[in-house]
Image: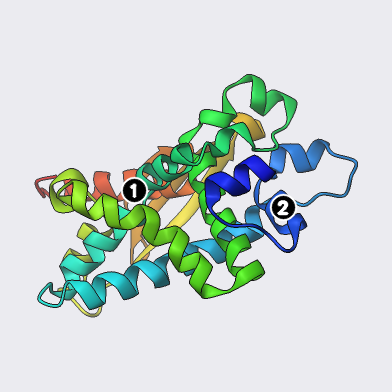
Amino acid sequence: MKIFEENLGYCFINKKLLENALTHSSYANESRDGLFSNERLEFLGDSILSLIVSSYIYDNYKRMPEGELTRLRASLVCEKTLCKFSRELSVGEHLLLGKGERKTGGAERDSILADAFEAILAAVYLDGGIEPARKLVMRFVIPELESYDVKADFKDYKTLLQEIIQRNPEESVTYVLTDEKGPDHNKEFTVEVRLNSNTIGVGTGRSKKEAEEMAAKQALSLMGETI
């Protein structure tokens, strides 16, 4: 834990929070130590991450319209970017994974690493408050913003679809999980995107987020949009 804290640049007062953040559901399910998975922390971390990133780009991209701000934020908090942050922290080396998950490469799986970053962020927030959490996020986000053109490198299909649907205020889209199969270490999710009550796209992925993006991509394609 000490080595990871050094990589993180933060020393926990409550070490149990860090242990919880690094505990995958596969390990929690096998453990007899009463450990909980990091899923609740991931839930909180997702919101904290969105708040910190939103605040920063709102303050620093003053001429960017709302739609572009949404797309920029999405590129910075997506699975692809978050797993990159986790790899820079060597999170995979410290994750507590079940035996099957470890054997099948869970320590390098994008969805697991992305979720772990959000859980770790939440743990930092609960242990030290918003400023240490902000420092952690901006350590990665600022170089990311400087290193590439996020609009060119990332396609956020959900946001693109939402922007199109919003042209008709009476319309709304929802994402519905319709299937979940496979063991914990190799899940596959299926999601339908629905316009009002009509299915307009279906997607599958190794995480719910990925499945939603694929469903939105199919919907955009069927609508004749260039993606």
The residue sitting at 75% across, 56% down in the picture is 15
Q: Which mark is residue 61?
A: none
Q: Mark 2 and mark 1: span between their CA atoms?
A: 28 Å
- Residue placed furthest toward the right: 32
Q: Residues within 10 Å of mark 2 (few under 14, many from 20)?
A: many
For the point 72% across and 52% down, the residue is 20
Between tags 2 and 1, which lies in front? 2
Q: Residue at label 1?
A: 213
- Return the residue nearer the eye: 101 or 202: 101
On the question of residue 182 being in view, the answer is no
The amino acid beneath tag 1 is Glu
Q: Quadrant of the C terminus?
A: top left
Query: In the rendering, at what x and y percent does residue 206 appear?
Result: 48, 36
Residue 5 in percent (x, y) is at 61, 49
Left or right side of 222 for 34: right
Can the viewer see residue 46?
A: yes
Which residue is pictured at 36% across the width and 46% down the height?
81
Could you tell which of marks 2 and 1 lies nearer the N-terminus? 2
Specify the quadrant of the image occupied by residue 179. top right
Say left or right for 200 vs 15: left
Instruction: Give me the residue at 70% from left, 24% from top.
Output: 100
- Give the residue pinned by disc 2: 20
Picture coordinates of residue 196, whole percent (x, y): 34, 68
